[in-house]
Image (cartoon, coloured by chain):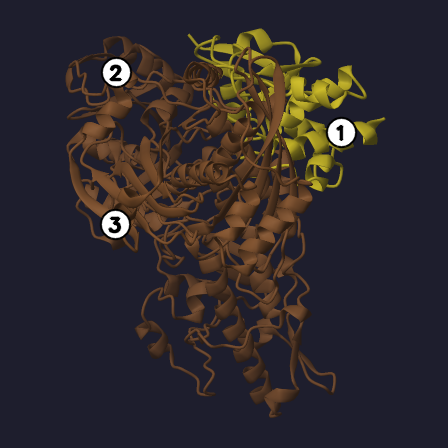
Chain colours: A yellow, B brown
Amino acid sequence: MARRIALTVNGRVSRIEVDDPTMPLLYALRNELNLKGLHFGCGLAQCGACTVQVGAAAVRSCALPVSQAEGKPITTLEGIGETGRLHPLQQAFIDEQAAQCGYCTGGMIMQAKALLESNRSPSDEEIRRALAGNLCRCGSQLRVLRAVRRAARAMA
Amino acid sequence: MDLPMMDRRGFLAAGGGLCVGLSLGGGRASAQGFRAARGLSLGEVDTFLAVAADGRVTLYSGKVDLGTGVRTALMQIAAEELDLPMSRVSVVQGDTLLTPDQGATISSVSISRGGVEVRRAAATARAALLAAAAREWSVPVEGLATLDGEVRAPDGRALDYGKLVGGRTFMLKVDPKVKVKDPASYRLVGRSVPRVELPAMVTGQFEFMHDVRVPGMLHARVVRPPAMRGRLGEVDDSAARRIPGFVATVRVRDFLAVVARDEWAAIRAARALRAQWARWEGLPDQSQLWASVRASPILRDDVTQNVGNAPLMLQKATRVLRSTFDFAIHTHGSIGPSCAIAQWEDGRLTCWSASQQTHELRRQLADMFALGADQVRCLYVEGSGCYGRNGHEDAAADAALIAREIGRPVRVQWSREDEHVWDPKGPPTLIDYVAGLDERGQVTAWTAEAWIPQGQSVSRATLVAAELGGLPTDASHPGSVQQHLAIQYGFPNIRSVAHRLAHTPFRPSWIRTPGRMQNTFGNEVFVDELAQAAGVDPIAFRLRHLSDARAAEVLGRVAKLAQWVPHEATRPVLQAGRRTGRGVSYVKYELVRTYVAVVAEVEVDVDSGAVRVTRVHVAHDCGQVINPDGLRNQIEGCVIQTASRTMVEELRFDRSTVTSRDWASYPIMRFPDVPDVTIDIIDRPGEPPWGAGEPTAAVIPSAISNAIHDAIGVRMRSVPFTPSKVKAALRAAREAGTRG
C-alpha cells in the first residue's frame, strides 16, 4: 500500500508516494526529487557520500528511513548555494581545487557544513576527526582540509 | 542522454555544416570525397576536433577523465595550440561512435599519448586555418597570426575560425612533423587552470554515470552467487513478485537478476529472491596464499632483464643477500559502486558506463552477444574515481544482458558488496631477490624472480555476466604487471624473470601502478638493503649506480626538500617506545619516462606495532607540465591512496568467496591518518609531457618500508605493514639477535 510522505527539502515541501516507508531517504531525494548532490556509496552509513543535513546534524541518507525524515528540515548540497551565490564551503572547494573525481565531494561539504555550524574555528585535528567518516579514494583529503580551513576563515 | 545512432559523418552533417572539406592544398574536397573518407583514423585532424559555425571547437577524446583533471588538461592543450579561449572548447570523451580509439585510459599516458595526439591535430588545424585565411584574402600566409579564435592580418583584418571553416571538416591528415607552438609563448599550458567540472560538482549539478536516466528505463539488481563460481539451481521468486514495482526475474544459466520499476523495489526484490546455489570451495586457504602462489603451474617465463651473467657471479660472490617480498591482493575501492545503463534497439546495443576502456568494452560486448562491433555503441559518462579495471565493464555487461532479456532499457547499480567482492582484483605478487657482493661490499650480481599471473599485451578482464551466463568472453589479462622487474641501476650483472602463472585466486586486474608498484616495492627496499650492506647513505648509493642527469636531479631535489642528512643505513633494532624514521625511494617510470624521488617520514610505536606515515616529500619530473595544480593533485592522490594500500589494505577471503565485503571489513585510510605531502615539481617546458597518475604511487610502499627500517631497524617486506606484522618482524629480529 503506497503511503504519502511530505518531505521538507531545502525549504520546500514535496509530497512523494512510497511503497515502503523504510526506504532510505537517499532514494527519495535522488530518484523522486531528482537531487544529485548526494551519492550512493555503500548503503551502510560507512562512507559519507550520501551525507545531507537533517536539522543541524549531518546524516547518512542511505541509512535513514524516509518516514523518519518526514516533517524535519532536510538540506542537501543543492540547497546551500548555487552558481553566482555559492556557500563559502562550495567556494573554498573550488578555490582549493579540493576534488578529484568529485563523487564524495558533496558529502564532504555537507559534513563540513555541520561541523562549522557547531564549531566556528575548528583545529586541524578537529576537522580531521569530523571528516573521519567520509571516505575519499582519490586522495584529495589534504585539499579538503585546506578548503574547510579556508571556509572557516571566510565565515568567521 | 537520448542519442541517435549516427556515425561521425552524420553527426558532423547534423551539426549544420556543409559536408565539404577544406584541405591544405587549396583545393576543396567534394562532398563525395568526405563520404568516402575513412572512419576515425588517428591520422585525421577531423578525428580529434571539429569547428562549429559559431567558432566553438569540440574535442573528441578516446582518453577519458577518470577524476584526474585530464579533460581540463586536454582543453588547455587544444586551446593553446589553436589560440582559442578555453571557454570555446568542449570535450566529447570515450563515445565509441564519435571518438577515436586511443587505447584504454591507463598507465598515465593520457597526456603523453592522448595530449600529444590532440596537440598535433590542433597544430595541423591551426596551420590549415591560417592557409584558408591567406587564400580568402589572397595574402601570403607568413604575415598572418592567430589569436582568440581568429586569424588576423597585419592590416587589422580578422576572420573568426567559425566563419573560416565552421561546420565543415578539415579533410586533412595530421602532420606528424607539424610545427607546434614554442613553449615560451604559452598562455594556457603550464598554468594551473581550474578544473572545469568543479563548479558543477560542488553544487550538485554535475551528472555522474549514476545520475543518468534514459526514457523507459527500469532498475535491475544482480543476485550474486554466495561462492565465486557457484552454479545456480532452483529459483523461487514468489516473495519477490509480491513487492510493489517488481517487473521480472531474469535468469541466464547462472546469471540471476531482478528488474523493477524503481530502484528500491529492485533492491527489495533482490533480497526477497530465494535461489539455490551449489557449493564451491576452490579458493586457496588464505593463510597459505604465498605457498599456493609458488605452487601454481608456470605457463612461461618472461626474462625481463639480462645483463652479464648474474647466476655465475652469484656463485662467486663473497656475500649473498636474499629477500622475499609479497604484496597483498587489493580491491579498487571506488567510492561509488559500478553503474551502467543498456538499451537495445533493432538488434543494436547502446551502453552508458564509466568504463576506462569503452572501445575495448565495445569489442567485449560485441563478442558476448555475437554482434559486429558497429552494432554496439559505448558511451562514457564520468563515474566515481577509477583506478583501473574495476566493475564498470561488468555492470555494463549485466545491464546489456538484462536489457536484452526483458526488451527494455535497464540501469544496473552495483551494491557496495558487489563492488568489493566482484570487481577484478590486483593479483597477489611474490618476488624473490638475491644479490651478490664482493669483499668490498660492491654489488656484483642482482637477480629477481617474480610469481605473477599470466598476461598478454592487451589489458582485459573477463566479463562476469558472460561467464555466469555461459556466453563468450575473454580470459583476463592484467596488463603489463612485469614492468619494473627490470631496473635502472647499473649493476654489472642483472637477471630478472617473471614466472607467469596458470592460476591466481581472482580475476586479475590492474589497479593504479599495476605490477610497477609491487615490483618497485621489492627493488627499492632491496636496494636499501644493499646500501646498508655497503655502509653507504641510501641516496648516495642510488646515485652511485645511476648515470642519468634527470635521476640525479630528482634525488638531489628530494634530498634538499626533505633536508636529508646523509647517513649510513644501519640501525639498531629498537626495543621499546616510539621513534621516527625517514626512507627514500626512486623510480624512472617503466625506465623510459617520469622520474620520481620521494622521502617518507614515519613514526613507529614499537609496543603496539603501529606505524603512522606523517609526511611524504616528492620531487617529480614528468617533462613539460600542462597544469601544475592538476599535477600536484595527482601526486597527492598517488601518495595518499598508496599509503592506504601499503598500511591497511588486504583483501580477505575464505575458500568460497571474498569476505572483505564493505568498508568495515576492507578499511582504507581515513582523514586522521592521511600524511602531509610536500612537492617539488621540476617543469621542463621544452621536453615532451609525460604522465603523473601512477609514477609517484610506485615508490610509496618502498619509501615507507625504508623509513620504518630507519626508525626501528627492521625491514618490512610484506604489504600491508600492519601492527601485527611490525611486531612479528621486531620479534624475529630480536630472536635473531642481529642488526636489522
Q: Which residue is located at x 73 percent, y 37 percent?
A: A91
Residue B697 percent location from the top left of the image: 49, 40
Asked if badges 2 and 1 are on one and the same chain, I answer no
Q: Is residue B228 left or right of residue B659?
A: left
Q: Is residue A71 left or right of residue B240?
A: right
Q: For the residue marked with disc 1, what is the amino acid? A: Arg
Q: Quadrant of residue B75?
A: bottom right
Q: Residues within 10 Å of mark 1 (few under 14, many from 20)?
A: many
Q: Is residue B345 left or right of residue B139?
A: left
Q: Nearer the viewer, residue B678 or B156?
A: B678
State yes or no: discs 2 and 3 in contact (Cβ < 8 Å).
Answer: no
Where residue B226 is drawn, which disc sits there?
A: 2
Residue A136 percent location from the top left of the image: 55, 29
Q: Report helix, strand or loop for mark 1.
A: helix
Q: Which residue is located at x 52 percent, y 10 percent?
A: A65
Nearer-N-terminus badge (2/3) = 2
Q: Quadrant of residue B622?
A: bottom right
Q: CA distance from mark 3 to mark 1?
A: 52 Å
Q: Which residue is mark 1?
A: A149
Q: Nearer the viewer, residue B101 or B16?
A: B101
